[in-house]
Image (cartoon, grey):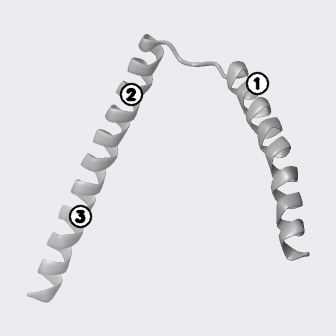
Amino acid sequence: MAAQGQVSKVREAVPRSITFLEETWAELKKVHWPTRSETYAATMVVLVLVGIVALYLGVVDFLLSQAVNWLLR
């Protein structure tokens, strides 16, 4: 009896999986895939912002370390 239950679960899972894959493919067709130039521009924005944040955090770290060193003297 237990084997029949597992077989029926597999039989139910296959059509559901096929439906899932069909719906996923339909959604992927709706996606706006960026062009090469859009990808390049977005990458440049990210790199510039990462550079700015890294510089800011480096300055803050330096100032805080100097303040701690001054306090510990």
Residue at x 81%, y 56% (from the top left corner): 10
Residue placed furthest toward the left: 73
Classed neighbour count for the residue bearing mark 1: other residues with Cα under 10 Å, few (<14), some (14–19), many (≥20): few
Judging by the rendered image, the residue that carries numbered circle 2 is 43
Determine whether 11 is above or below 32 in the image. below
Near-viewer residue (15 or 49):
15
Task: State the image coordinates of residue 7 (x, y, percent, origin top left).
Answer: 84, 60
Viewer-nearest of labels 1 and 3? 1
Residue at x 19%, y 79% (from the top left corner): 68
Task: State the image coordinates of residue 6 (x, y, percent, origin top left).
Answer: 83, 66
Classed neighbour count for the residue bearing mark 2: other residues with Cα under 10 Å, few (<14), some (14–19), many (≥20): few
Horizontally, residue 52 falls left or right of residue 31, namely left
Report the amino acid beneath label 1.
Ala
Q: Which mark, residue 61?
A: 3
Report the amino acid beneath label 3.
Asp
Determine whether 17 is above or below 40 in the image. below
Report the amino acid beneath label 2.
Thr
